[in-house]
Amino acid sequence: MGYRIAVVGATGNVGTEMLTILSESDLQVDEVHAVASRKSVGRIVSYGDKDLKCVDLDKFDFTTVDIALMSAGGDVSKIWSPKIAAAGAIVIDNSSAWRMDPDVPLIVPEVNADEVMNFKKGIIANPNCSTIQMVVALKPLHDRATIKRVVVSTYQSVSGGGKKNMDELWLQTKGIYSNDHFQPINFTKQIAFNVIPHIDIFMDSGETKEEWKMNVETKRILDPKIKVTATCVRVPTFVGHAEALNIEFENELSAEDAHELLRESPGIMVVDKREDGGYVTPVECVGEFATFVSRIREDSTQDNTLNMWVVSDNLRKGAALNTVQIAELLANRKLPRNAQSK
Ligand SMILES: NC(=O)C1=CN([C@@H]2O[C@H](COP(=O)(O)OP(=O)(O)OC[C@H]3O[C@@H](n4cnc5c(N)ncnc54)[C@H](OP(=O)(O)O)[C@@H]3O)[C@@H](O)[C@H]2O)C=CC1
Ligand SMILES: N[C@@H](CC(=O)OP(=O)(O)O)C(=O)O
């Protein structure tokens, strides 16, 4: 028998990707329910070649499903994840609401799959999109040469902020061409033809919460001893996050060895030729599952240090794909069906 799954936030950027990936997954699925807010009731979303009618979160009976894939934002998750878990379904949540809760495993399947069953609240968290692609690339290198410190600069697409941010980049861009000035709404400054070094709120330390998340989440998933310092930047691309990493190791690791190691590692595609176009850019990773690694090279200014460029589809590996992979891990570990189902 297969699982019964609810996708909460089914009309959103991440929710629609979840439905697509779920329809292509090997996971045995008996039923899928598309759940969104009241305003989307009756709206049709695609699940493979099937149409699903959206239902209202407030009215949905979660005792009828085994797994809820949540991507409706942190505020919704804070209220609803405990209610859904109390109804006997396991929640896999995409928001930042539960990531630092010690009773909630924070999972990237290529890195810490063995922790997936340690859910004490019936909730499992999906890390931040920028963290996910970074730790997928760091894990094999850490296992080989022990990472001491990572300096990361991100180039994050506007889809990280939801559909409204994608629409605004489009309107701002059109406005500039048609001399029809558009005041920023969801961004602090003009994003079209610009970059903004500000994602999420500022913290007392002066870093942004996105930068803080990359640090604390990496420690939780990979190793608390690793130091991470980040500068997170929003750029005017629609989908696909890029990251420039400078990685300092305890032990020696040549660029050539890192190249070989990454090439054999799960979830990673190395595209690294020292010629025009021998690297991956965000538009090329859209719709792909892999985390792409390019520009692997030694940092000549410091011993045991490598530089590299990491690119991934933030709506897929950064969110929907990682969530579905977590559901697959649960299935492989024989997660029982919801005991509260009648
Ligand atoms: N791993 C990561 O880093 C990422 C995490 N995320 C998380 O996923 C969330 C969704 O992102 P994204 O898909 O890009 O956002 P969108 O804005 O594109 O979609 C939001 C979805 O949430 C639903 N929703 C919002 N409020 C409610 C409510 N009160 N009740 C029920 N449903 C509601 C919306 O339904 P409706 O259309 O009916 O309003 C819609 O389906 C983000 O807020 C973030 O927390 C997103 C990207 C990456
Ligand atoms: N902050 C990410 C997306 C996101 O929603 O992150 P989080 O789930 O950590 O709030 C971005 O804007 O690219």
Image: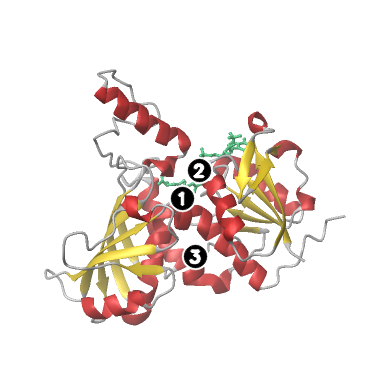
Q: Locate residue 77: give its quadrant.
A: top right
* Mark 3 lies on residue: 108
Residue 341 in sight from this viewpoint: yes
The picture places residue 155, in percent across and down from the top left corner, at 30, 49
Label 1, residues with CA under 10 Å away: few <14, some 14-19, many ≥20: many
Structural distance between the alpha carbons of marks 3 and 2: 20 Å
* Mark 1 lies on residue: 315
* Mark 2 lies on residue: 13
Amino acid beneath label 1: Leu
The picture places residue 97, in percent across and down from the top left corner, at 55, 48
The vertical placement of 325 against 193, above or below, is below
Amino acid beneath label 3: Val
164 displayed left or right of 90: left
Q: What residue appears at the point 36 percent right and 27 percent down from the top-left corner?
A: 171
Dot 3 falls on a residue whose secondary structure is loop
Residue 102 in sight from this viewpoint: no
Q: Which numbered marker is on residue 295?
A: none
Label 3, residues with CA under 10 Å away: few <14, some 14-19, many ≥20: many
Decide if ligand 1 comes within 8 Å of the CB at mark 2: yes
Which residue lies most toward the front here?
A: 49
Decide if ligand 1 comes within 8 Å of the CB at mark 1: yes
